[in-house]
């Protein structure tokens, strides 16, 4: 289990951002900019029972590995998302029930009548550019730029956002760096996660 703390910023224009032109990259960047293509499917019951109880369950392929993730809905304010997360690397794209039994989903995993009702609800697919930022006092933050889409069988919506995720150090740097980015005029704090966007689409079926 880990506490995920990140600030999401929505890009308010359609045009792609030049990642290297983001004001933080040239000041705090450590190492090279990396690229990934991420495909993530979220699972729930037809009545969205997991979401109703404040949990998300997903399988993600990052181009090399399958990852199984459970997230709590947590707390969101002014673009800052704070939530508990359980993530494990898998051998393939099948859920590892033993690992899921070590998360808050245990009671549902142990109930075959419930577990068999789970199915894919929506998918996110996006390209991610990311790098590590390090401040003068060794606070470490991952800066990521995501551009793609979230979709169900019949609907889709764009994903176009920047994320700042605290990896270690002082939380207040997230707010400070986010304010610096928003000063560009085309980024603003976003309280809606990708999962929330997907559930909103799924509820419109």
Image (spheres, helix red, strand yellow):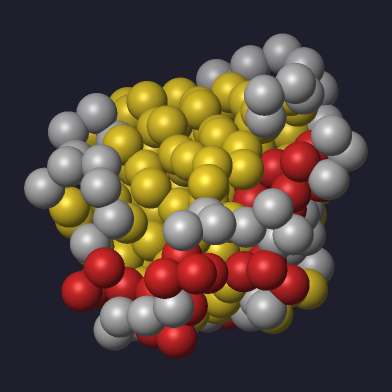
Image position, residue 29 (x, y; %): 34, 45
Q: Is residue 148 above or below residue 145?
A: above
* Quadrant (top left/top right/bottom left/bottom right) for the C terminus: top right
The residue sitting at the front extreme is: 113
Q: Which residue sits at x=75%, y=21%?
A: 154
The residue drawn where x is 70% and y is 43% is 198
Residue 199's spot in the image, x, y percent?
Answer: 74, 49
The quadrant of the rendering that contains the N terminus is bottom left
Seen as rendered, the residue at the extreme left is 91
Q: Nearer the viewer, residue 166 or 192?
A: 192
Does residue 56 appear in this view? yes
Image position of 152 (left or right of 27): right
Which residue is rendered at x = 72% and y = 13% of the image? 15
Using the image as rendered, state which of residue 117 and residue 171 is in the foreground: 117
x and y, in percent, of residue 195 in the image: 64, 51
201 vs 59, left or right, is right
- Could you tell me if residue 175 is visible in this image? no
Q: Nearer the viewer, residue 19 or 198?
A: 198
Specify whether 189 is left or right of 70. Answer: right
Please indicate whether residue 166 sits to the left or right of residue 183 in the image.
left
């Amino acid at each position: 289990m880990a506490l995920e703390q990140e600030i999401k910023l929505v890009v308010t224009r359609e045009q792609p951002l030049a990642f290297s032109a983001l004001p933080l990259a040239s000041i705090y960047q450590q190492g090279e900019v990396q690229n990934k293509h991420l495909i993530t499917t979220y699972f729930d019951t037809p009545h969205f029972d997991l979401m109703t109880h404040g949990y998300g369950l997903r399988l993600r392929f990052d181009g090399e590995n399958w990852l199984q993730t459970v997230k709590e809905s947590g707390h969101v304010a002014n673009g800052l998302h704070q939530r508990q997360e359980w993530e494990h690397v898998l051998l393939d794209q099948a859920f590892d029930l033993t690992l899921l039994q070590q998360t808050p989903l245990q009671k549902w995993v142990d109930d075959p009548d419930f577990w068999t009702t789970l199915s894919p609800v929506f998918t996110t697919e996006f390209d991610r550019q990311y790098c590590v930022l390090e401040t003068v006092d060794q606070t470490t933050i991952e800066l990521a730029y995501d551009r793609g889409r979230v979709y169900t069988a019949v609907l889709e919506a764009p994903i176009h956002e920047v994320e700042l995720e605290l990896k270690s150090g002082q939380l207040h740097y997230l707010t400070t760096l986010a304010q610096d980015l928003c000063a560009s005029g085309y980024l603003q704090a976003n309280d809606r996660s990708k999962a929330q966007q997907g559930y909103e689409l799924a509820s419109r079926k």
